[in-house]
Image (tube, rainbow, N blue to C red):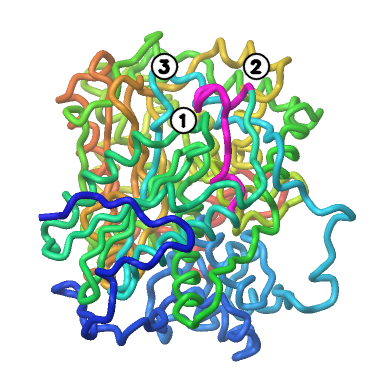
Amino acid sequence: MAEPVRPLPGPGAPDDPAAGTAPAPERDEASGPEPQGVAAPAASAPHHGGSSRAACGPVDTLRRLVAQVLGLAADAVGSGQGFTELGGDSIQAIQVVSRARAAGLLLTTRDVLRSDSLAALATTARSADGPGAGEGPAEPPRRTGPVAATPIMAWLGELDGPVDTYHQSLVVRTPAAFRAEHAVRVVQSLLDTHDMLRLTVPGGAGAAAAECFVPPPGGIDAHTLVEHVHAPDATDTELPALTAGRIAAARHSLSPADGVMVRAVLVDRGPLRQGRLALVVHHLVVDGVSWRILQDDLRTCWERLAAGQDPVLEPAPTPFAHWADLIAADATSGRRMAETTRWADTLRPAPEPLGGICPLDRLDPESADRRLTLTLPPEVAEPLLTAVPGIVNGTVNDVLLTGLALAVLAWRHPVTGPADGGTVLVDVEGHGRQDIAGAPDLSRTVGWFTTVHPVRFDLGRPDLDDVRTDGPAAGAVLRMVKETLRAVPDHGIGHGLLRHGNSRTRPALAALGVPEIGFNYLGRFPMGDSADWAAAPGHDVALDESDDGLAMAHAVEVNAAAHDGPGGTALSATWTWAGNACPDERAHALAHEWFAVLRALVAYAELPGAVGLTPSDVSLPGLGQADLDAFEAQFGELL
């Protein structure tokens, strides 16, 4: 049983007497070797100190960092392999950029994703101490003061229902030597380093588009934000429920109007066993990439505390407030406004289910009774995330959205029949940290960057039976979906800018409505690691949580994530749906149909000749898919 929550002592107060001298600590039941006292993090943890710089050449440094980010053994990453070939995605590329900066190398996410090999990537890297590395704007970018509302912040204000507790959370394993006073110092460092964690929204979270600002660091005392739960007898089995209960209580203490965007809960099992640290953060100031930054920072803070140093963190090169100013200006640029017609055409109506705009003015709230999570095992998920994108020089999103579009067609075919026009309209979420607006470095910026944009897949009438039996129809649709996504300018950031950030285009785009289905691939997360600061078992990572009563934004939504564990990489998908828009049995049928199609894509990719170029792969203008298909049919064996 956990003892009652105890308030933490204020600054200068004596340490908790329960945290005194104790025998050497032990790990969780399945954890492995026990730590020795207040030891620094394990060697596998990312190191952010300057001492690692120049310890090895740039190629070896990149091999080590990529292995860390992808959860691979160091000897499994060769200099001749590319990042995407190894299974990396755009979100993980941001992590590589961030860790490379800490190791003394300057890269861009575009460099990481486009380099054919790590050896080639090393040639694009610049030394953080080299010529021009310290050059920046004449005036430092603005970190505090008013923050221009980004499109996703404005989107939140349009949701129907309570949003002051709309949050995400992360639960990590803490070292056995990690005490309450350490938790306070770590949270204080996060608050003082990452500006958006101090965001204040006077009118509440739903009014962020009207006014919000970031005060200077030092004004928020972390002692008031950290709860200490003393639970010396809690078992590993009991920890998830205990921690989840404290998270549920902590979220109700979030108060954007008062600048309380963060709460932390330390579940302390004494000096012998790992504990848990839960960070509960309002979604206005955090996203999936931000959690990776914060998790790395937790490790770094502990490393420095263990060495007797202050847990000082490197500030983000580009503050969120500066980025918000840049994209606010971009929203009214001629280049961006030229996209308006394109987005209006994307949102034109279609009569088929999940083919067009949601017809309801208000959808039911999300409910645990209308939620389904399915998981693809590693033997399917691993080739799905690596081999299948590779056959078309594509991305994981290309593959998952191909499967979703085909699943929707198959799911509704018994109703629509041969009259089905083959259109599927999807709202696609992205991480939003695009190389635009001067390509600022966002690899260490914490905030909510998410973009949401509609994508219209006009698939025609593919042979669904052929798709189900691993036939070439699957490859044709995969190439079509890839090209559709490549044609979206700047990964869709313009839609949100024009829909929310431009007074001239906002009314017309708002009147067009939103697609019925929303899709989000959160990327890959390491799971099952028993090391200190690893994600703790029994908790979702980076999934949104809100109070009852908040209406769903789409009739059907799917959030997918890859989890890298000891047994391999699995793909989990959580489906939610509005009861007044989609019957339960139909939602379940669609979820299972999607996984059936994804399995078929894996089987197709294993066939000889299941590879093909698309027009975006070549630089010859006017060359279409039919031309490339004919070329490959004639000369495929020579390619």
In the rendered image, residue 207 lying in the magenta stretch gets the answer yes
Q: Look at the image and give the residue range highlighted in magenta.
A: 194-210
Contact between marks 3 and 1 (CB within 8 A): the answer is no
Tell me the number on the disc at residue 427: 1
Which residue sits at x=14%, y=63%? Answer: 236
* Residue that label 2 marks: 506
Q: Earlier in the sequence, mark 3 or mark 1?
A: 3
Question: Which amino acid does the dot numbered 3 rest on?
Answer: Asp
Q: Earlier in the sequence, mark 2 or mark 3?
A: 3
| Residue placed furthest toward the front | 13
- Name the residue nearer the viewer: 34 or 423: 34
Label 1 SS: strand
Residue 62, x across and y down, in percent: 56, 78
Question: Which amino acid does the dot numbered 2 rest on?
Answer: Arg
Please tell me whether residue 472 is drawn above or below residue 34 in the rendered image.
above
Label 2 SS: helix
Tell me the number on the disc at residue 160: 3
Tell me the number on the disc at residue 485: none
From the viewer's perspective, tell me whether residue 132 is left or right of residue 7.
Answer: right
Q: Nearer the viewer, mark 1 or mark 2?
A: 2
Residue 356, x across and y down, in percent: 43, 18
Residue 637 in sight: yes
Contact between marks 1 and 2 (CB within 8 A): the answer is no
| Residue placed furthest toward the bottom | 55
Which residue sits at x=24%, y=32%? Answer: 590
Task: Give the Cα distance between marks 1 and 2.
Answer: 17 Å
Please tell me whether residue 449 is drawn above or below residue 64 in the rendered image.
above
Task: Give the Cα distance between marks 2 and 3.
Answer: 19 Å
Please tell me whether residue 200 is drawn above or below residue 93 in the rendered image.
above
Residue 292, x across and y down, in percent: 46, 59
